[in-house]
Structure formats: C-alpha cells, structure tokens
Amino acid sequence: MKVCVLAFTMLMAAISHAQVRPTEGFVPDSATAVVIAEAVLIPIYGKERIQSERPFTATLKDDVWSISGTLHCPAPNTGDISGAHPKARAFQNCMGGVATVEISKVDAHIISMIHGK
C-alpha cells in the first residue's frame, strides 16, 4: 500500500510540475521577440540608448529570432536624420553600432546579446 501511495504521489508531483509548451513556442512572433530583446537590453545598455535604436527588426531562422536595432545616420552636412532620403542614408558612411539579441523561439532563452561599436 505504501508503494502505491508513493508512486501515486510521485506521479501527481510530476504532472503538476510538467511544463506547458505553446505549440508556436514561447516567442511566437517578431513583436514578442522585440519586446523580450528590449527588456533584456535596457538594464545593460540603458533605456535612452536602446530607445534610440528603434525600430528593432526581428528575423527568424531555424527557430532562433535575431533582433537588431537600427543605426540612425545623420543627413550629410546637417547632423539631422529627419530630412535625409532613405537611399542617401544607405550610401553614406555611418560610425556606430546597434544591439543584437538572439532568442530561442521554442523556450525563449537568450542565446547571445551584443552591442556593436
């Protein structure tokens, strides 16, 4: 009888602690990936710096989200990015780097996190 009670108790404990895994993974879409990336970046690099790299883009490859910030380059000779034509920005040299985070789609663990210079 004690063996049955012990086996039942162990079975119930295992069932109650079983992890539920969403069919689409814990990070099902790019919007969720960006929110997680910003949440882990802000405590390290600061809210102002990370917000300055918005928008963040997320791409999925082999169940790994790669999330990167945007490097905002000033318009030539003005220091202002608001008036720069998007194609002009692509051809100018721009110093700096952005944050990049890799996150597992399946279980949401942070694979890597770096910030370019």
Image (cartoon, rainbow, N blue to C red):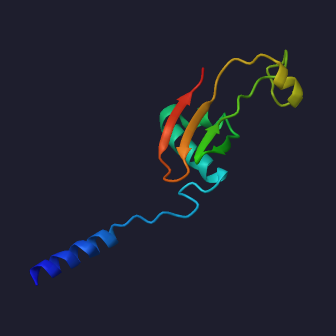
Judge whether 44 appears above or below 79 on screen. below
Judge whether 110 appears above or below 76 on screen. below
* Image quadrant in which the N terminus is located: bottom left
Pick whichever, 91 or 72, lies toward us. 91
The residue at the far left in this view is 2
Give the residue displayed 76% in from the left and 24% down from the top.
Answer: 73
Judge whether 24 appears above or below 96 on screen. below
Q: Is residue 108 left or right of residue 92?
A: left
Q: Is residue 113 left or right of residue 3?
A: right
Give the residue displayed 66% in from the left and 43% down from the top.
Answer: 58
* Image quadrant in which the C terminus is located: top right
Q: Is residue 65 left or right of residue 90?
A: left
How many discs appear?
0
Q: Residue 19: x and y, percent?
A: 40, 64
Q: Residue 2: x and y, percent?
A: 10, 80
Give the residue displayed 74% in from the left and 18% down from the top.
Answer: 94
Give the residue displayed 59% in from the left and 34% down from the top.
Answer: 100
State the image quarter where residue 14 is shown: bottom left
Q: Residue 71: x and y, percent?
A: 71, 28
Q: Residue 37: x and y, percent?
A: 56, 43
Q: Is residue 5 left or right of residue 94?
A: left
